[in-house]
Image (cartoon, rainbow, N blue to C red):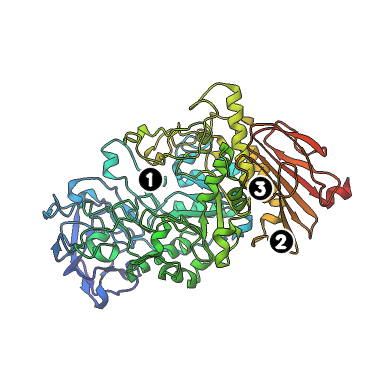
Amino acid sequence: MISSRQGSTYPLGSTVTDKGVNFAVYAPNAEKVYLCLFDGFGRCEKNRLEMHSHEGGVWSIFVDSLATGALYGYRADGKYNHLDGHFFNVNKLLLDPYAKDFSGDFTWSERHYCHLPVGEFNSLDNAIDMPKCKVAKEQAYTGEKPNTPWQDTFIYECHVKGATQLHPQIDKSKVGKFAALTDPAFLLHLKSLGVTAIELLPVHAFVSEQFLTTKGLQNYWGYNTLSFFVPHKAYCVNGDMTEFVDMVRQFHEHKIEVIIDVVYNHTAEGGIDGPMLSFKGLNNNGYYRTINSPESVYINDTGCGNTVNIDDPITLKLIMDSLRYWVEVMGVDGFRFDLATILGRTVEGFSCRHAFFQAVLQDPVLSSVKLIAEPWDVGPGGYQLGAFPSPWREWNDKYRDIVRRFWRGDSGTLPELAKRIHGSNDLFEHNQRGPLNSINFLTSHDGYSLADWVSYEQKHNEANGENNRDGHSENYSFNCGFEGDVDNSEVVQLRHKMQTNALITLFMSKGVPMIAAGTELKHSQAGNNNAYCQDNEVSWLNWSEYEGNQTLIRSISELMKLRNELSVFQHPFFVHADDERFSVEWLNKETRPMSEHDWHDEGNKTLMYILADKLISKAVMVILNADTERLSISLPTPPFSSNWECMFTSEQASDSDVLPISFCLTGQSAWVLMSNLEENTNG
């Protein structure tokens, strides 16, 4: 006979002591809540223990002699009313929102639905198709963290599985897993690029949507969260959550930070017709946003069926507790927040003073980690680029789009291009933020790869099973004359050159640079710009197909080294005319200061600029020529030396060449020139 008694209401979840395990769960409107204990295989429900009710809506129980590894779940009984959003159904086994580990897999079945069809109570028990929560003992992370300043940060956005699944030098037993990311072969690759932070697509436990599994597809990206605490078990070799911590520790030993992409805007429970797995069966109207009447109708500002209600104090607490857990226990260095506008939404709309932002700012743990917002959602007023408070950074899609448009040859792009290169002061300076608040990127997991940007003018998403209707239709892409893969050497060379042009722009812009994994390998998704469900060779990086100068590895490595030499990119503030140390000068085709006419000349597709540090007497001149025509130019007088030295170019020219005063600038090319006092003295 198992022995139990009233437990503590804090902390929520399961807590191991030397005498047993305490369980606490929030279910304010339930009439009864049960703790269900399972055998070691998770197949048989051995005990169903009624929990004790406390003020504030928390239920608890302490089970004597229970230990780490015990398998459990909850059942909540009470009012079931389809119209008012109360879905209590004791036949549904519910996951603990605070579970730290799982045992077993999730299987889709009609048992998960609380009603079949809408409004009809479903009495089928779903326990057989549910993973079981596993009692785990927390241990604080003890590794030393790199704490890389933002001005030195270079982000590599990466999918855990796709990055290494086809890597020929990594043992087959761990490819596609957390362990593979810190294999020497992959670590050496990141170090050679100059990467300081790896940003992992969702690593919280997730499941594939049923509409995908019925088509034989999977949710590859992972934006369908099942738990805010448990690592995705498919990424573990032996199913042990410590494998994630081991990965983080090894990254830290190599001075690489770990940022994880987190999805706190919606969950895998979907809409009213979705499954009941956890939150929906415990406090549906608290965890999710619903309309006033009927309250069973979800507000869908995420486009995924439900929207997490962060206005609710217990929901806010859950997210804050989750964030601290991933920092203090799992060891991560920061977060990229998917659809982050949701986290600042009130019933009136987005607010940069939302309680969530205030809670993070005052939190002694979270206020010091890297915080990156995807500053939009699909709800009304959802686009909020530039509206987040300090110390948040933001994905800058305006940077992405204007760089793509400029190199595609679009007219009238120079004024905005200059703003983005300068760090987007129009977006960030209004609330005392600087250029380092802009995460500059050319491509990410969502959309075309960089190779496909110069190879496809039309998306090719047929494999997704939605008749090519999904994904963005405007990608500001071009195909260099031929759609898709070609054997034409001139086209291949032009595509390589155009990708290099874009990368030169990226690394010679103020802000924090980010590339998507595979950019350096010229990875192609065959024109699929929404490969979220392609868990196959479409998304996996092909390490064996590219060799030597066919890749962009050397270009990225050299550009990052060059960037690190230039203090102007480390300066945390915007450079204005009255700056005592730094200066920026924009030049036209005649290398004279840009006039109003030059800025607004629709046909002008050439931009040059000089960034100088007067304190150390060093300047860099960047030439971006998207015009297809050759251009003869006369270089301006170098500010600190007798000549300009070519440090990098997309042309077939030798690096470190001293350039003549006048030379011919080829079409569709980019150049980085250097002038410094040291070169003049040593020369």
CA distance separating discs 1 and 3: 58 Å
Kindly identify the amino acid type of the residue bearing the numbered disc 3. His
The x, y position of residue 267, in whole percent, is: 32, 55
- Say which label, 2 or 3, has the lower sequence index: 2
Q: Residue furthest bottom?
A: 55
Question: Element under label 3?
Answer: helix
| Residue displayed at 68% across by 60% down | 575
What percent of the width, then of the height, locates residue 230?
37, 56
| 180 sits left or right of 135 in the view | right
Q: Is residue 202 above or below residue 361?
A: above
Residue sticking out furthest to the front: 597
Identify residue for label 2: 577
Check disc 1 and report the residue beneath it. 234
Helix, strand or loop status at disc 1? helix
Q: Amino acid at mark 2?
A: Ala
From the viewer's side, name the closer residue of 237 and 227: 227
Q: Is residue 564 left or right of residue 130?
A: right
| Image: 380 above or below 534 | below
* Residue 264 percent across, percent down from the top left: 38, 58
> 681 left or right of 533?
right
The disc labelled 1 sits on which kind of residue?
Answer: Ala
Q: Which residue is mark 3?
A: 597
For disc 3, the neighbor class at 10 Å (few under 14, some 14 to 19, many from 20) is few
Mark in the foreground, 1 or 3: 3
How far, Cα to Cα, is label 2 from label 3? 20 Å
